[in-house]
Image: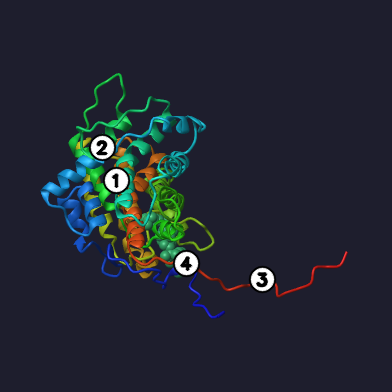
């Protein structure tokens, strides 16, 4: 009693066993249920990856068809949820809305919530995966004052998301297949990343037996910050601030200056001390998207490429093994598709929901003990309350 391992930031503490995702940070390897992330991004689609993460094996064609049909069945939100959206200020950040709305799902589904029952857990997973694109798109529609669009079940998961984002009742909207494919890749590349801050938050909240929608809302809150899911928004803000290639060197120097809090956003990772394998796929996808849209000369892409090149050759970044991470290029793709920066982290949350849910489900499928970290106490020793 009283002797603990002191590990601030959990750099060397394994808090659980898990069979979902494997990372070798030194080699830049990321496997989901054994499959390399680049192979999944190349050959699979997001819903197949969801099935894999959750169930441990790739589905057969029939299983995948059934899974996709089930997800489509659950894509609408309860109509009372509209009231919930309407309660927010019209300029609320979409992440603030998403945190609240996902937490509020627990009010709609609290009575069917026996977390020891695998069937009830399964349907919760279906609901979450199905409803997240609708919630995310409605967060956007609310912020721009356009009517909410209902999901269209004849479209793929990514197409439907783009439709609900950019469609209006006045005009037919046809999602561009290249942009939908890029969107799907962004979903896949963010789907899971073992015990990151938000997933650990979901596990910790879930370890108490709390309602799973509330647990996922806690993950959304943890994802929000610029050191985690907020980084892709921060990358775009940074590129805008740099503004011109001639300014890059100055910002690199700022990032290296220990008296300056500025960091190169989209660079560095707690686990990867090599190229983030997701960043490689993102970079290729960024080129495909900008080509499709005739935006190859996009000044921000040029700044990003030059920044990457300079940083990869600079001793400061080389010595600290700081490489571009997944968020370095994802923002450029999202911006080119027409998605505003305030929605970037919302899209990360949409994608990571399957990871959060798979970990919550894994934890509830076996022995689960409440998470309860200890501390090194640094406060006062015992003292008497002063006599008045
Ligand atoms: N720019 C400049 N210096 C950096 C950066 C950066 N982006 N990242 C780390 N360093 C330096 C840091 O100052 C420290 O230097 P020193 O040893 O001289 O004090 C050294 O590298 C190690 O950094 P750390 O802060 O101890 O590393 P960490 O594992 O605690 O933090 C990180 C990891 C991702 C929070 C950090 O690299 C960072 O702030 N990066 C920018 C934000 C970002 O892109 N986040 C997205 C992460 S990937 C998506 C996700 O998982 O959500």
Q: Position of residue 162 (x, y in %)?
A: 28, 34
* Structural distance between the alpha carbons of marks 2 and 4: 41 Å
Label 1 and label 2: CA atoms lie apart by: 9 Å
Q: Nearer the viewer, mark 2 or mark 4?
A: 2
Asked whether the beta carbons under mark 1 and mark 2 sit within 8 Å of each other, the answer is yes
Q: From the Cβ of disc 3, is ligand 1 less than 8 Å away? A: no
The tag earlier along the polypeptide, 1 or 4, is: 4
The CA span between labels 1 and 4 is 33 Å
User: How many angstroms separate mark 3 from mark 2 (CA)?
Assistant: 54 Å
Q: Is label 4's Cβ within 8 Å of ligand 1?
A: yes
Which comes sooner in the sequence, label 1 or label 2?
2
Q: Earlier in the sequence, mark 2 or mark 4?
A: 4
Where does the C terminus fall, quadrant-wise?
Answer: bottom right
Q: Which residue is mark 2?
A: 73
Which mark is drawn over residue 9?
A: 4
Query: Is the residue 289 above or below the residue 356 in the image?
Result: above
């Amino acid at each position: 009693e009283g002797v603990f391992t002191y590990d601030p930031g959990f750099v060397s503490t394994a808090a659980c066993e898990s069979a979902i995702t494997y990372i070798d940070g030194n080699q830049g390897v990321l496997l989901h249920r054994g499959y390399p992330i680049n192979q999944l991004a190349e050959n699979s689609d997001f819903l197949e990856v969801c099935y894999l993460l959750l169930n441990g094996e790739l589905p057969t064609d029939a299983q995948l068809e059934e899974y996709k049909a089930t997800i489509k069945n659950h894509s609408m939100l309860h109509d009372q949820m509209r009231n919930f959206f309407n309660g927010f200020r019209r300029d609320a950040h979409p992440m603030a809305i998403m945190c609240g709305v996902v937490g509020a799902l627990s009010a709609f589904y609290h009575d069917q919530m026996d977390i020891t029952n695998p069937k009830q857990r399964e349907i919760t997973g279906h609901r979450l995966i199905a409803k997240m694109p609708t919630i995310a798109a409605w967060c956007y529609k609310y912020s721009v004052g356009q009517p909410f669009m209902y999901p269209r079940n004849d479209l793929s998961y990514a197409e439907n998301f783009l439709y609900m984002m950019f469609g209006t009742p006045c005009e037919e909207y046809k999602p561009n297949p290249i942009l939908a494919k890029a969107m799907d890749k962004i979903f896949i590349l963010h789907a899971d990343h073992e015990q990151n801050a938000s997933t650990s938050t979901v596990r910790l909240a879930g370890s108490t037996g709390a309602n799973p929608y509330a647990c996922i809302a806690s993950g959304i809150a943890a994802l929000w910050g610029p050191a985690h899911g907020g980084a892709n928004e921060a990358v775009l803000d940074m590129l805008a601030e740099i503004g011109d290639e001639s300014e890059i060197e100055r910002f690199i120097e700022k990032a290296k200056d220990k008296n300056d809090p500025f960091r190169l956003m989209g660079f560095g990772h707690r686990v990867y001390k090599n190229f983030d394998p997701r960043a490689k796929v993102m970079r290729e996808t960024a080129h495909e998207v900008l080509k499709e849209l005739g935006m190859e000369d996009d000044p921000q892409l040029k700044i990003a490429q030059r920044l990457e090149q300079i940083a990869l050759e600079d001793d400061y970044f080389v010595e600290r093994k700081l490489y571009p991470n997944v968020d370095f290029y994802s923002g450029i793709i999202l911006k080119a598709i027409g998605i505003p920066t305030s929605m970037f982290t919302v899209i990360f949350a949409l994608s990571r929901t399957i990871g959060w849910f798979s970990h919550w489900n894994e934890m509830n499928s076996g022995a689960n003990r409440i998470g309860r970290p200890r501390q090194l106490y640094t406060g006062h020793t015992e003292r008497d309350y002063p006599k008045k």
